[in-house]
Every structure is written in C-alpha cells, then in structure tokens.
Image (cartoon, rainbow, N blue to C red):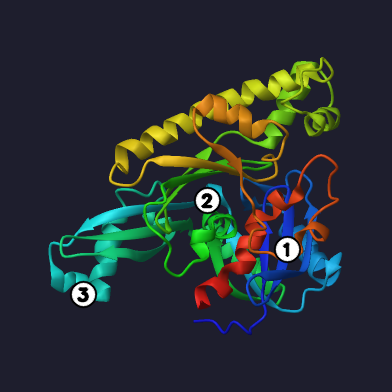
Amino acid sequence: MFNIQQKFFGLDISDFSIKIVQLKKTKEKFDISACDQIDLKPGIIDNGVIKDEEKVKEKIKKLINNCRFGKITSDNVVACLPETKTFIKLIEIENSNEKDIDSHDSLNSIIIKEAEKHIPLPIQESYIDWQIIEKDKDALTVLIGAAYKKITEQYAKILADLNLTILALEIEEVAIARAILPEERMPNPEKNQGTKVILDIGASRSSFTAYDTNTILFTISLPISGKKMTESIAKSLNISYDEAEKKKIKCNLNSKSKRNIKARSVIIKILSEFANYVKKAIIFHNNHFYDHDPINQILLTGGMSNMPGIASLLAEKLNNQVDIANSLNSINKTEKIIDNYSKNYDQSASFTTAIGLALRNYIIEE
C-alpha cells in the first residue's frame, strides 16, 4: 500500500488537452490544492498516440511549474492511458482445479489464457493486469485490464524524462468511475443498487462503461465526439471549424428559438446516432451480464456532458433515467476552483478523469 501522507498529483493526457489535479485530504472529503489545464494543437496527440513527444513534455512541465490555481508540490504522478488503447472487462472463470487456482503462477496463466477470448488487443503486444472480484467453489469473477505495450511504454518514458515518479498508469474509465460514483469510494458498498452506465462524451472520443456492485463490468468505445459535432456543423453550414465550434458551445438543445437552429439540428442528429450506439451497448449488457442488476441510471460526464438539454434529449431517446454526473462530490469548496474556463459549460466535467486519478492512492489506502 502507498502511504497516504505521500503527495502526488493526477495527470490526464488526451488528444486535445492535458489536465492536472492535486488534492489534499480533509476530515471527510478533499480540497483541490492545485489544478490547471492546457490545450494541445491537433496532431500533437492522435488517437492516444503521442506524435510530438517534446511538445507534450514541454506542456506537462509548464503545467507543473506554472499551475494557475495553487501549486503542484510533488514529483509523484498517477496518469491515465488513452481509452482507445486499453480494454477492461469482468469475466468468469470456472474453478475446475482448486490447486491451480490457489497457485498464483498457475492462476495467472489460466486468467491470461481466458483473457485471450475477450480482449480485442493482441495479447503479445499488450500488458495484462487482473483482480479477483469474487471467489466461490465453482468460479472466479475476475476484472481484467489490458493496454498496448507501445503506448504504455511511451507514456512511461515521457513521464520518466520529466523526472516524475510514476505511482500508476491507470485505465481511464477506472479513474472516471472513482470520481463520480460514491460507492467506488466506499469500503463496503451496498449491493443491489442497480447497474449504472457512465457515458463519457469527450472532445476526441466517447465511451460506455457499465458498473455494478463496486466493479466495472465492461467498456465500449463509441465513435462520437465533440470534434465530430464541430466538423459536422462546419460542413453542414459551410463555415470554418472555429465558427462551428462557437456555434456548438452556444447551443442549447432545450431552446425553441430559430437562432442557431441549424447547428442545433446537426447536434440532435448526431446525438440520435449516439443513442443508437448506446442502445446496442445496453443490449450487449443484457445478453452477456444477465446475472447482474438491470441498468437503472445513465450518468453523463466529459466536456460535452453539460450542453444544456443533452440529458433530457438522451433520456427520451434511451427511455431511461439520464443525469449529469457530479465529479466533485468528494471535493470541498468546489464553486471557486474549477470554473470560469467557459461561459457555457461547467468545466468540472472536463476534469473528471484528472480528479479520479488524483483520488487513486487515497482510496486504495483506505
């Protein structure tokens, strides 16, 4: 276990931005002692692959040394690996040979062999990690995670080049769940709360994560993003990308006004397409995780999640409860910390991953 007195910060590296958060433990919750973000030009990172390593190192160094809110006071980092280059799923393994199950080396071989049936990444090119969630006389329930070796090693090298001590490189969805789900931070959460779905709608990609009884069940990447919305608006209205971005930011899906109606129509069409992808993921859940509770809540997070009217629109399309996730529910004095980055969006949603990373070692220690 890590010493909870050891200071560290969370670092969220994505295609279009890098975000940093350092927390301080209080009696019941946490204070944000430092946070900031810096934008990246397109092409510096492409689909999780860092194309310009020197530029990324320069930006991270700037965030650490010139943090606009508070001060980063540690060289210890918990960072995330890109969602598109990782995989996580809950699997069940028959307990056919108890001797093999009791031996760690044998168990590792059994799990890796079983993981090959589920993981869409080449096993030889991936790092595999696993955690036993439940064990009985008949079967093991195991959460498996995988990440491309090349990506993992690239991110590790960049952080090491900056003389940072890596405490963990984490799958992004794990950090997101930790930030927004109170039960993820409870030592003994109540069961039968129902399966929750987390929809993370980001600038460059989106994901679907199913979560039940203190564990992720599976994740799926979805081909919808804030960038795609902007590009579609630009093409449909025959305007520049920058003009389309402004129209997207001003868009209110609840509005009945004719103002900005064309951009609004484009976004509604894309979100309808998005809802169809989500429906397919829900069907997958129902078919493959039928022994878990039904989905009873959908939570939205990510930079696009606070577009006015998005929750009610998706609730209508999905015929399910859809709420905006609160990534600050473990944080004290939130209103003065992560705000004023935009007039139209609550930017705390953009910091969800960074907050989850900054919580990691505190939660593990507890």
Relative placement, left or right, of 143 versus 141 is right
Of the numbered discs 2 and 1, the one sitting upstream in the chain is 1
Please tell me whether mark 1 sits on a helix, a strand or a loop: strand
- The Cα atoms of the two marked residues, 2 and 1, are separated by 21 Å
Toward the viewer: 45 or 215? 215
Image depth: mark 3 or mark 2 in front: 3
Reply above or below: 52 against 278: below
Toward the viewer: 24 or 82? 24
For residue 324, which quarter of the picture? top right
- The Cα atoms of the two marked residues, 1 and 3, are separated by 41 Å
Residue 258 in the image: state x and y as whole percent.
82, 14
For residue 267, which quarter of the picture? top right
Mark 2 is on which residue type? Lys
Of the numbered discs 1 and 3, the one sitting upstream in the chain is 1
Residue 161 in the image: state x and y as whole percent.
69, 72
Residue 85, labelled with which disc? 2
Please tell me whether mark 2 sits on a helix, a strand or a loop: helix
Residue 70, labelled with which disc? none
Visible in this render: residue 67? no
Visible in this render: residue 338? yes
Query: Which residue is disc 1 drawn over?
Result: 20
Query: Which residue is disc 3 drawn over?
Result: 102
Please tell me whether mark 3 sits on a helix, a strand or a loop: helix
User: Could you classify mark 3 by the number of other residues whose Cα lies within 10 Å: few (under 14), some (14-19), or many (20 or more)?
Assistant: few
Which residue is at 38% across, 32% downward? 283
Of the numbered discs 3 and 2, the one sitting upstream in the chain is 2
Mark 3 is on which residue type? Asp
Which residue is at 52% across, 65% downward? 185
Relative placement, left or right, of 366 versus 261 is left
